[in-house]
Image (cartoon, rainbow, N blue to C red):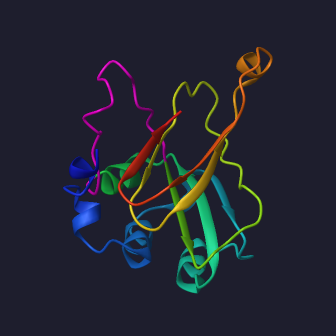
Amino acid sequence: MESELIKWPIARHHFGLKDIEEIYDSNDWKNICLFRSNIKTSDHLTLLKKMRSNKVFQENCDQKTEKQMRKYYKRPEIVPSMLELTKSNWILVSQNYTGLQFKLIDPSPGTQALLMIQIRGENRIKAEPKEFCASRGCGSVEDTLRPNEMCMN
């Protein structure tokens, strides 16, 4: 998997906050499905410029922005073609941020699978089972995603 990910433009190019800022600056922010940050501001571009020791989670539903973001990555070959990937995508950005608690990422209703790919840095993740599975004894799984690693849940 690592050899595939390092070929992505996002891994070869030093993709960072400035790139995200440019993509969203050229599009309309009104189609973001979900946005969370520990910085209190209503202007998302200002937020990206203020990032020092912070986190941003957002689910993007705008087709134009999705297309621009997908120039930087592609469907991993390991993911079967019969598995449909949804239109929306998530961007998780953090910089010098170490939280004591896991931050909830709640996928859109109907999401059957979640694919997480770590490009740079690392993130501690915890996958909780859906109620149906939890009631049958399924437990949560914790792990750390490092650069060029993928987790499918």
Give the percent coordinates (x, y) of residue 11. Answer: 28, 63
Q: Is residue 122 above or below residue 1?
A: below
Residue beneath the point at 41% across and 66% down: 120
| Closer-to-camera residue (144/85) | 144
Residue beneath the point at 61% across and 50% down: 125
| Closer-to-camera residue (111/45) | 111
Residue beneath the point at 72% across and 68% down: 99
Q: Count of labels shown?
A: 0
Please name the predominant secondary structure of the magenta segment in the image.
Answer: loop
- Is 25 placed left or right of 8 in the picture? right
- Is 31 placed left or right of 54 in the picture? left
Residue beneath the point at 56% across and 70% down: 94
| Closer-to-camera residue (143/67) | 143
Q: Is residue 130 above or below residue 13?
A: above
- Is 17 placed left or right of 134 in the picture? left
Q: Which residue lies most toward the right here?
A: 135
Q: Is residue 95 magenta?
A: no
Q: Where are the magenta residues, as a range? A: 71-89
